[in-house]
Amino acid sequence: MTADPRVAKAYAAMKALGLHKETVKPVLKNLLRLFDRNWDPIEEENYRALADAIFDYEESKKSEERDRSEAIVNESEPSLKRLHRQQGGQASASGCNSNSFLGESSLKRPKLEEDGSEACYREGRTRTMQFGDNRVESEPVSPMIHLKNKGKESASPQTCLEQEGAGPLKMGRKDRRIESDSAISPETATGEKISPSVFRDKGKEPDSPHYALRDKISPSGRVSHAVCLKEPKIETRMVLLPRENIPNQKYNSFIQPKNEELTDDLYQFEVPIAMIHPISAPPRNEGLVSTKAYSSGNGSTAVVDCQRPRASQFVNAKDGGECVSLKACKTGKVHEFVNIPKESSTSFELASSPVGEVKIFLNCGSALGKSGFYVPNLDEVLKMVEDRCLKSYRIIEPRFSVMNLMKEMCACFLELGTDSKGDKVGNGRNVIRTLDALGNSNTTNAFRPKKNLQNNFNVSVGSSTGSGDFKVLVPQISRILAMDGLDSHDPITQLNHKVLENSNAERVKKEKVRKGQGRGNSTSLVVVQQHRFGDVRPPHDVSDISKGEESIRISVVNEYGGEQCPPLFYYIPQNIVYQSAYLKFSLARIGDEDCCSSCFGDCLSSSIPCACARETGGEFAYTQEGRVKEGFLHECISMNRDPVGHPSRVYCKDCPLERSKNDDFADPCKGHLVRKFIKECWSKCGCNKQCGNRVVQRGITCNLQVFTTPEGKEWGLRALEDLPKGTFVCEYVGEVVTNTELYERNMVSSRKEKHTYPVLLDADWASEGVLNDEECLCLDATFYGNVARFVNHRCFDANMVGIPVELETPDHHYYHLAFFTTRKIDALEELNWDYGIDFDDHNHPVKAFRCRCGSKFCRDTKRLNRGKSLVLS
Ligand SMILES: C[S@@+](CC[C@H](N)C(=O)[O-])C[C@H]1O[C@@H](n2cnc3c(N)ncnc32)[C@H](O)[C@@H]1O
């Protein structure tokens, strides 16, 4: 019996396809592992990824068996002959690209198979085609942005989606089946497959195609081919698949197969391209790079001459590979590959400039450590790749060529990176997001168009009126963002956009229509139905978002563009139970020891602390000024800042959070902080409303404003006045839901919401035995909430701390989460608190996002790593 409804649903969906639970289970398990337990990519399109994975797994098993029997037959044959047979379509799956992606083993991190690589190159040796007519010109290249497979980071879900999971999971069974039992494995070492979708007819001929290429070998045998393309006018291309057939664009990242060297010999070079062996590169310098060329020591030149590259972005090829970081420099000339390779890997990089130059750089690391490695003939490599595409991907179109494929990649890159619709307002927004994702929002200007590209590339450049932002929506980057919620398409807020979201608006719209999600016009502020309950959310009053619910007005300002209004929600000044939460306030339940019925006036003025101070060790937590006392505040702050090492971190035997997920794959409890509580006097106390031990219950008294943040976090909250340390700012208000209800909500929303607004009231979850579901409470401010729903996260050194405060009940299962300043805050400073989230935990109710907190202690290491790779000097 499967307890988890998601697992059950998956089984049911597969059952409908005739797949038994036993077959489904191991693959599902692997997929969950692969996606870091993120169900979204699995559930999408009626479990298409899962079905594909199962089919591929089954086929790869069959293929392996076949290969095994062939290997036995071929055992006595000379290796050369076997290699020829590979060429002819009989190669063993254990050759160059043998990793099976989908089965138990194939979901492991991809490893380079040296033997396989060598076999590939040896194969190249036996061929006689010559590569000629390489032409090198040395014109400078304009600013570049870069996309790169770094091949280093561990597989985050988004990484998996983009790379490891990209191939087999994203391809439709029918239109892009990969013949896994073909002679040469369809999968690269990373399990990637090339999407045929990149072949589309653009109907353009290239201008005098020339090609140039430098094959460089590092001392260790690392090979890189780089190609610089000038004026990539598009040659007539074949149509293999209509774009609409692509099941899910976001999974169609284009990543080259391992060991397959793709180069372009058609375009005219602007600059000589060569590779830099990372080892030979000078030490990393975060400042400007001025070196022009490096020598790897064996004659391989390291030259990259590129003017004013502005940004770079890596896309991982796979795990365990080298970390090569591409550095763009302001003054120009050099791309520096700075990190030392750990192991062999393959990286892939696309770069483009605002004026449309595209550069493709491939770095094949698989020959590392092979002493006799030499550069194979390029034409042979191309031929081999084409053969593979023919056999493995069933690309039978006679005009297919790697060159065309590469051109298509450039065309897609440019097409997606520019705005064919001239959609103006949305562009700047994407630029900001993309560039912020790159770690430097100041680079926006770098992408402003200098000239119209229409003639060259059949794409137009969108520029926002006024700002003139050039839209650069790099597909891989935007997908990464989408994975982490920065750019996902919330069906509700999407409808409230004043502008079309991005350059892909048309495509997104089509996709939505196809999925039956398209709903009306997104250009006007509309009141839309909640996808959850079918109720209607009221429009905002920007002069006071609380609509009079608070004692002060809280205005809304939009200074940076983007969403004109915050997402719609009901403003409530106090928590409201949604349904099942056990929250019973009764005077009878408050014992004498939990109130001060004999007090009078202001408890703080009494020399003897009242019973309500019991919770805080017999001392009131507040000062006479109504601020949290220094010592207490610091304890709360330190507890938050070092939650893992904190002694008050406890682990549930039966964690409600994990319990609500699923039985099959539940993790052990990740721990909860046993927090310090404040107990305020309340209705059963004899003191008056002005009692100094009543702070939170008086509500918001500071001047606050909802505003658009410049860093791309969208809406945030700021103070309009200086706030001293320890000041109560606001409470986190929302619907009180049980942990299970929250889990169900998350399932329904399927993590497609752009932002999430849950808070766990878990301060006491682990201190007792097993809690009932209705006692495991959370606050969800998605639909009903107060101004605190706008407070963004900051890692560690946030200027507010959330402290559990008891008002009505001494029961620790329910409490108020109140925010107090951790230091003096200046007027107009953004307010933030540390959500305490683990950025690697994509299964947590608080959806992990790509953190833009700007703290030097930022925990979002993936972003940091990526940021490091994206140095803009
Ligand atoms: C409680 S909401 C905060 C308000 C939100 N910015 C908005 O516009 O409604 C939490 C969401 O804000 C975004 N967010 C909060 N802190 C962030 C940060 N440091 N970096 C990036 N996004 C952040 C995330 O999307 C998160 O899911």
Image: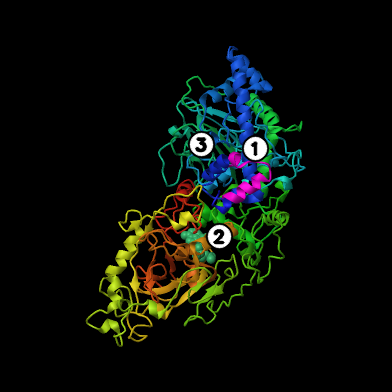
Q: Nearer the viewer, mark 3 or mark 1?
A: 1
The disc at residue 55 is 1
Where is residue 213 shown, x and y percent of the image? 60, 31
The reply to whether dot 3 and dot 1 touch (C-beta < 8 Å) is: no
Labels in figure, total? 3
Kindly identify which residue carries mark 3: 108
Q: Secondary structure at mark 1?
A: helix
The numbered dot on residue 404 is none
User: Which residue corresponds to the image point at 34% horizontal and 79% vertical from the top-left?
Assistant: 681
Mark 3 CB within 8 Å of ligand 1: no
Which span of residues is magenta-colored? 7-24
* Three-letter residue code for mark 1: Phe
Q: Is residue 688 above or below residue 298?
A: below
Residue 840, magenta (yes or no)? no
Q: Pinpoint residue 348: horizontal percent, then vertical percent.
A: 56, 38
Q: Residue furthest left?
A: 607
Q: Amino acid at mark 3?
A: Lys
